[in-house]
């Protein structure tokens, strides 16, 4: 069985960020959830990068739940023709630059697979799932 999925299709990367989970030790149930903070910080970092002339084709999409509640914050990157990755244990205060670095490499790859040695540590240690791309429509016909 091959492990390389269908040929890449260029396009926007969707970055789903879970906004529901909270840290287990958080004493304030009304505190802003880490995922909501992460989504906001990532959107600001992407906007700053675009303003500096170095945009990434990424759209941040907050979602209510990614069902990885034991590993907050969680995010998932997907794009047509690319492998989807889900990562957990993300810290919105310290991992934003690593996330952007990893996503830039994801965007530059043919199929969404970034070689292990080139991934930021959070994308190595925090990986929850790797999901194959959907077959291209013209390949399925």
Image (spheres, rainbow, N blue to C red):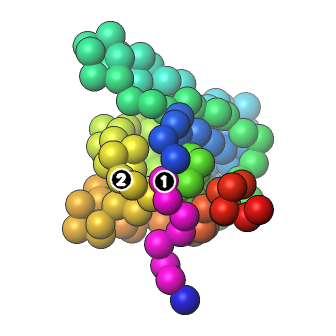
Q: Is residue 26 visible?
A: no
Which part of the image, by quadrant, shows the N terminus?
bottom right
Circle 1 — which element?
loop
Residue 118 position in % (x across, y down): 23, 60
The structure residue drawn at horizontal position 39% and vertical position 30%, both measured from the top left corner, is 56
The residue labelled by disc 2 is 109
The structure residue drawn at horizontal position 33% and vertical position 46%, both measured from the top left corner, is 108
Q: Nearer the viewer, residue 125 or 139?
A: 139
**Label placed on residue 8:** 1
Residue furthest out toward the left: 117
Question: Horizontal placement of 41 versus 29: left or right?
Answer: left
Is the Cβ of the residue at disc 1 closer than 8 Å to that at disc 2? yes
**Cα–Cα span, label 1 and label 2:** 8 Å
Q: Relative to 70, does residue 1 appear above or below in the rendering?
A: below
State whether the magenta stretch is mostly helix, strand or loop.
Answer: loop
Q: Relative to 105, does residue 59 appear above or below in the rendering?
A: above
Residue 22 position in % (x across, y down): 65, 47
User: Which residues make up the magenta segment?
Assistant: 2-8
Q: Picture quarter containing residue 103?
A: top left
């Amino acid at each position: 069985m091959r492990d390389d999925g269908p040929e890449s299709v260029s396009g926007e990367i969707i970055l789903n960020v879970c906004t529901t989970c909270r840290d287990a030790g958080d004493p304030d149930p009304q505190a802003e959830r880490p995922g909501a903070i992460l989504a906001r910080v990532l959107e600001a970092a992407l906007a700053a990068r675009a303003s500096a002339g170095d945009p990434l084709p990424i759209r941040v999409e907050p979602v209510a739940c990614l069902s990885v509640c034991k590993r907050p914050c969680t995010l998932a990157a997907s794009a047509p023709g690319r492998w989807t990755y889900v990562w957990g244990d993300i810290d919105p205060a310290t991992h934003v630059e690593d996330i952007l670095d990893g996503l830039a490499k994801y965007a530059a790859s043919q199929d969404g697979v970034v070689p292990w040695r080139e991934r930021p540590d959070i994308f190595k240690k925090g990986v929850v799932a790797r999901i194959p791309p959907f077959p291209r429509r013209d390949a399925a016909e």
